[in-house]
Image: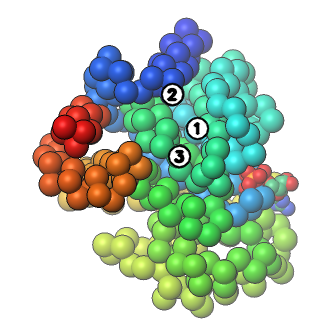
Amino acid sequence: MISLKKKIELSNILEKIEVDGDSLENIKLLDNFHSKPKSHVLGITGPPGAGKSSLIDKLITIIRKKKKTVGVIAIDPSSSKSGGALLGDRTRFQLDPNDGGVYVRSMAAKNYLGGVSELTYPTMTVMRSKFDFLIIETVGVGQSETSIKDIVDTVILCVQPGSGDTIQFMKSGIFEIPDIVVVTKCDMQKLSNQTFSDLSGSSSYFKNKNEWDIKIILTSSHKNIGLNSLEKDIENRWKWLIRDNRLNKNRYSQDIEWMKNSIIREFGFAGLKKGFEKINYKKNPFSELARIYKDIKN
Ligand SMILES: Nc1nc2c(ncn2[C@@H]2O[C@H](COP(=O)(O)OP(=O)(O)OP(=O)(O)O)[C@@H](O)[C@H]2O)c(=O)[nH]1
Ligand SMILES: [Mg+2]
């Protein structure tokens, strides 16, 4: 449970990092949060209007019923403003403003088409140290969402029934991304059954990632269908991740990936060539990246 005071503190930290993430003080702060992860980080992705926010709303209820805490990062493709929503983001989620176990942070996607932006990783790092669950909503169209898998432990892809997205997804290779596939709005029965069988028929397109069994789950947020199955699968996923140290291995690769992408953004591929062999990463990725930046510049 986090108090209003703690929520304000958290908002202030996140603000500081957005404004001045490169300062020595903030780099230390970020590395400190990075060393104390707590959450199972879930990425909820899918095309616009697929029912992602409605699903997150239901997941929040389920998580809170279990007396667990949850943070949400909502990446908004249409907004150019970021900010904390101390009393809950009411336009998006139906939250109880007095509930200390939920915290929602909205982030502008700017030119990232609703995908992951350079601020998502540090924001995730801070929030991951605070809650039992951290949920990140991104709008995925085409390639822009590929990087969500570099930020979260579990990717949940929402597919809207009858949207024709299935074929689109197969073409674009998006099916390599999800760990769980959710067919939303299954109260639209005929359409969702069709989509379900399309997906099941094409499940060979799902890349089998390290023996994790990718499930296709029918849900309805409006009629409360399939949500317990989804919760169960999320729980199984967590147990699977913990086993054999998969979670830490995944996160380690994600840190490296983030460093590489940051170097490319800052210095281009030439910079990566120069800087990558300098990566000698064990812990404290934020300090490590700052050190590499300095090296490349010199
Ligand atoms: N019939 C039905 N409609 C739903 C269900 N879940 C969501 N919707 C509707 O679908 C529309 C989009 O829902 P959102 O949850 O906002 O979808 P989203 O994917 O978050 O949308 P963006 O964030 O704008 O991309 C809304 O009109 C919802 O009421 C459902 O279970 N059944
Ligand atoms: Mg939404």
For the residues labelled 2 and 3, the Cα–Cα distance comes to: 12 Å
Q: Is residue 84 visible in the rendered structure shown here?
A: yes
The residue where tag 1 is placed is: 72
Left or right of residue 19: residue 286: left
Q: Is residue 12 above or below residue 272?
A: above
1 vs 2, front mark: 2
Q: Is residue 288 visible in the rendered structure shown here?
A: no
1 vs 3, front mark: 3
| Residue 238 location (% of width, % of height) | 38, 53
The amino acid on which the numbered mark 1 sits, given as a three-letter code, is Val
Q: Which mark is residue 117?
A: 3
The residue where tag 2 is placed is: 18
Tell me which label, 2 or 3, sits earlier in the chain. Answer: 2
Q: Residues within 10 Å of mark 3 (few under 14, many from 20)?
A: some
- Give SS at disc 2: helix
| Residue 120 location (% of width, % of height) | 49, 41
Q: Is residue 104 above or below residue 205?
A: above
Colouring of the image: rainbow
Q: Which mark is residue 193?
A: none
Instruction: Count numbered badges in the picture.
Output: 3
The amino acid on which the numbered mark 3 sits, given as a three-letter code, is Ser
| Residue 174 location (% of width, % of height) | 54, 73
For the residues labelled 1 and 2, the Cα–Cα distance comes to: 17 Å
Quarter of the image where one finds residue 126: top left
Tell me which label, 1 or 2, sits earlier in the chain. Answer: 2
Tell me which label, 1 or 3, sits earlier in the chain. Answer: 1
For the residues labelled 1 and 3, the Cα–Cα distance comes to: 15 Å
